[in-house]
Image (tube, helix red, strand yellow):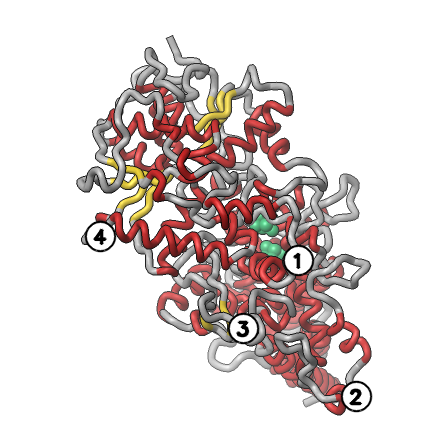
Amino acid sequence: MGSVQIVTTILAFAITAVAVWLAVRAVMKMVAVIRQGQPDPTRFGDKGTRTKTMLAEIAGHTRMLRWGVVGAAHWFVMVGFIVLSLLVLEAYFEVVSPTGGLPLVGGWALYGLVTEWLAILGIVSILVLIAIRLRNRPTRPGGKSRFTGSTMWQGYFVEGIILAVLIMGFVIRGFKVATDHFEYPVWAAPLSHAVGGLLPDWDAGVSVAALIKIVISMTWLIVIALNVTMGVAWHRFLAFFNIFFKRDPGANVSGLGALRPMTSQGKPLDFEEADPESDQFGVAQVEQFTWKGLLDFSTCTECGRCQSQCPAWNTGKPLSPKLLVLSLRDHAYAKAPYLLAGGGKDLTGEEKATAAQLAHLDVLALAEAEKPLIGTAEEGGIIDPDVLWSCTTCGACVEQCPVDIEHVDHIVDMRRYQVLIESSFPSEAGVMLRNLENKGNPWGAPQNTREDWTKGLDFEVPRVGEVDDFEYLFWVGCAGAFEDRAKKTTRAVATLLNEAGVKFAILGEGETCSGDPARRIGNEFVFQMLAQQNVETLNEAFEGREKSKRKIVATCPHCFNTLGNEYGQLGGEFEVVHHTQLLAHLVATGKLTPVQPVDGGVTYHDPCYLGRHNRVFAPPREVLGTAIAGELTEMPRNSERSFCCGAGGARMWMEEKIGKRINVDRVEEAMATGARTVAVGCPFCSTMLNDGVNGKGAGEQVEVVDVASVLLRSVRPEQTPGGTDTERLPVAD
Ligand code: SF4
Ligand code: SF4
């Protein structure tokens, strides 16, 4: 070993020892913080499926590849990172000896070839990612981007380090070529040979370059070890765990559809016995999230995909799902020293730690612990109430997140505490909650008017109890029963079912609100009250039937979601379909025959709770495909990337005081397609988009109607069934 190699070896191992020590300390700190969360025993079952999903998502980049170029570039960087870690390991042999190499694989042409090309593609890919970050930098002319609010230096730092490490790999190989110590032929390592042609025949060059590569790599490790909230770097390790422990192990997108039940100490809360002095009601302190919540916050890469799709953020509201996650993460880590010293408030608000336990604590950690989780900037709050109440629970953030963060569950958990314990929520929603409690529907309409929509139909609508050989129970929903526009859809669906010879029956006055608005605003108590009542009614209606014969058809995607995905949590197991699914089936099997296509151009707006939350994208399009002239005109934001109408998450009953109205944004997009008909599959979307169209003064030119109405118009073009909204839809000659 020459004198140069003695120096390079000492320096390489010294910096590595420091970096590894700091990294171990950082990992221990991170684990300790995550362990402060509440238990969640539901995350450990079905390990086989979890492993399969995790491998598919990581090795196949199934989520990332939805963003084509970025996904592909990230895949090469990820694979490059894993394989080229071997090359960093190899550098430890090269600081010792210029002819050093990895045992076993070193010198094998195939290894040389694979690593050469992964490094080349890695350099190209990281340059693409850097260019994308620069092009979307928040400071560029033109304003906000998905990176607004991200810690930009961290992104550039990580990308710069990867680039430098990859380049140094070629410099090392180049020196080996120049000094005639390189084992791989030109066909296996063409770039290394080309670089070698430019470098001097300097024997110590290999060891010095290898030292530089190790110093760069260890600098990265030291920096991330000193910054445990640096998700852009730590996600490389944490993403494996976050994806493995996702809520729905087999689902491509987890955290949509049903909400996570309210739990205390890891057990679902039973409101008959729950006591706010001993049971946790929602989340009021960051440590009241589950450990998986804290792992979610730690894993965020700050990529901003969620932010770029969020309807609230895109219309000037203060909510960005990314910034919400980052605020919770930073708060959790800043408060951690206090929690780890034994600090924390019990459920009555009393401090758990003794004065002695907190005596030597950093003042900053103590100050952080005093901050309210929900509060305005003046109150020092971590999450502003306007942020919390801006969410429509549309799920666009969850859909986009490449590391499976479950934003909606976290947002609703915080709402639950605000509503149930603090009674603090937008006051206008209070009327809706009172109506739910007292009248069983959000509008406060008298229960005995639930069947008024049946008036004027040219056939009898059967009721459960009067008939028992029905195939489908038609769940009408509160909007479908009381809201004028939605009543037209209800009539259209009933007419089509009758036309197709489907045996169906309604509950009539036996139906109450599914509970969706109560649950999404955070009032789990009212939700459970309504849901239990409905589960009882439905179980009675289906008595003696097995699950596959307990069929329900719903026109409201919120009811469809709640009945199908959430009533199971309360003992109600049903086969629930959305009316567009049933109509698509009836058309496909020839039970309904569209005869005259609806003309003038048609576009379709995907309701969030039908599309993203329940993956029903094709059936409404299939129905429209048979009922309209020409092709369906898609809006730029459609299917998984559809843009919310603004009504979900009980926002239907809250005023929209900040920024641009979400429904207006969506209507502008719909109108820009030039379509005369905007088809929807949800009564709330219908209301919101109709309001938007009317607000733009375009009510005469553009019709917003349900898919069922478009189909009915095509099936019965000559005859407008009473009380439907089909007459204004133009049909082709
Ligand atoms: S659910 Fe929708 S509105 Fe709420 S934070 Fe996510 S993207 Fe934004
Ligand atoms: S999409 Fe996920 S990882 Fe990316 S910023 Fe949003 S929460 Fe973080």
Mark 1: few/some/many CA within 10 Å (<14, 14-19, 20+): many
Mark 3 or mark 1: which comes first in sequence?
Answer: 3
Mark 2 vs mark 3, foreground winner is 3
Q: Which mark is residue 360?
A: 2
| Residue receiving disc 3 | 279
Q: Earlier in the sequence, mark 1 or mark 2?
A: 1
User: In the structure shown, which secondary structural element does the residue marked by tag 1 occupy?
Assistant: helix
Q: Is residue 93 at all visible to an observer of this figure?
A: yes
Mark 4 lies on residue:
543
Q: Nearer the viewer, mark 4 or mark 2?
A: 4
Query: Please, is residue 117 above or below residue 275 in the view?
Result: above
Q: Amino acid at mark 3?
A: Asp
Front label number (4 vs 1)? 4
Quadrant of res 469: top left
CB contact under 8 Å: marks 4 and 2: no
Q: What is the distance, in whole Å, between disc 4 and disc 1 at their CAs?
A: 45 Å
**Can you tell which quarter of the image residue 511 is in?**
top left
User: Which disc, if any, is residue 324?
Assistant: 1
In this rendering, the answer to whether 688 lies above or below 627 is below
Amino acid type of the residue that numbered disc 1 sits on in the rendered structure: Leu
